[in-house]
Image (cartoon, grey):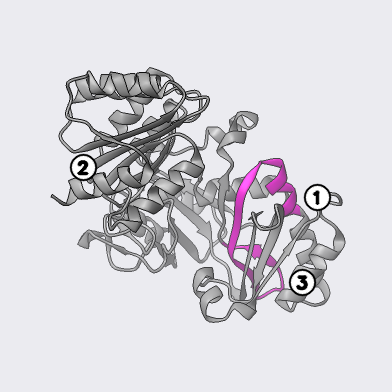
Amino acid sequence: MNIHEYQAKAILREFGAPVAVGVPVLKAEDALAAAKTLPGPVYVVKAQIHAGGRGKGSFKEAAAGDKGGVRIAKSPEEAELFSRQMLGSTLVTVQTGEAGKQVNRLYIEDGAAIDKEFYLSILIDRATSRISFVVSTEGGMDIEKVAHDTPEKIVTFPVDPATGIMPHHGRHVADALGLKGDLAKQAGDLTEKLFAAFVAKDMELLEINPLIVTKDGKLRCLDAKVSFENNALYRHPDVAELRDLSEEDEKEIEASKYDLAYIALDGTIGCMVNGAGLAMATMDIIKLYGESPANFLDVGGGATKEKVTAAFKIITADPKVKGILVNIFGGIMRCDVIAEGVIAAVKEVGLKVPLVVRLEGTNVDLGKSIVASSGLNVIAADDLDDAAQKIVAAVKK
């Protein structure tokens, strides 16, 4: 689960991390009063959307101006003007795609006199199965670009779970950023506080880009991006309350109601599979035969008829879907349950695109019999390779 910058900074502030004072704004008429509560004389007006590249983005509406989603205001009145231009407008960045995202929230923050910019993040490194730091002197830039062009400028190191965070981790961060003296001490203190927040809140990613040194020699988290482990949210009701549904895909929201693992993609073939590994293999083989998956969808090992029906409805609600592939290997999941769910969903919402069904495993003969006797125009497949070829061929007709 992702949250907005102002929410992330509020969490970091709880753990003592240095962040500027700021006020979230939901209505333009509140912007002037919000700005006046800040020290000034410089104010930063930031669009709050779940996407990076806001400063370099542009608005679709002419009335929103062309100064991007992060603007420097020299007075509370100018901060109010920017707020009126930005709220309700659609911001397009490198991460939103051409559709962009509507700006429904702003964050007006006290300005900072920047001397240097760095990059610092904490994430779960799957290669080492440990929490790891990623640090770079190239702050304010896309870390992917830095990794591609100048990988030597990125320093990565893990934290041993047996020891947890230690003083030498802070020294490692300071060395990587070339910080000495008091700034090195600040880096050590910040390293410990960010790690504490990451662990306490079950974060998946904590990214500070940029981490700055101010003109008066202070470290400050100028931006903050945080995402959380969805499966741990039950331990953090305060975090769960921060969820902004307006920033999420409607189909993904619906899937979460049925505990379905669903991610919308840009392809044309909808997939319903049980098991994450099989789902990945299914998407790969669709690509192999020349098409692209429209989604990742894992119905899980214990899906019910109702759950499968809901999954099918979500897939068919995507206008990009030109064909559907159901690929089930029944272990815990029974093939007849999948078949009943698919048939029920098709009868309820109709079937306007080709549907290929491949079943194998527990109760496979019963499942195939249910599909065959349904009277529906369903294409049966013997194995995954056969299924992929058939759905790709059907879509290309």
Residue 201: percent from the left, percent from the top?
Answer: 66, 41
* Three-letter code, disc 2: Pro
* Three-letter code, disc 1: Pro
Q: Mark 3 or 1, which is nearer the eye?
A: 1
Between residue 231 and residue 75, name the one nearer to us. 231
Neighbours of disc 1 within 10 Å: few (<14), some (14-19), many (20+): few
Q: Is residue 131 above or below residue 140?
A: above
- Residue 294 visible in the shown view: no
Residue position marked by numbered label 3 in the rendering? 174
Q: Residue at x 51, y 45 (%)?
A: 3
* Three-letter code, disc 3: Ala
Residue position marked by numbered label 2 in the rendering? 319
Residue position marked by numbered label 1 in the rendering? 161
Q: Quadrant of residue 383?
A: top left
**What range is drawn magenta here?**
193-222
Left or right: 259, with 132 as reference point: left
Q: Mark 2 or 3, which is nearer the eye?
A: 2
Q: Is residue 248 above or below residue 108?
A: above
Residue 150: percent from the left, percent from the top?
Answer: 57, 81
Neighbours of disc 2 within 10 Å: few (<14), some (14-19), many (20+): few
Asked whether disc 2 touches disc 1, contact meaning CB atoms under 8 Å apart, the reply is no
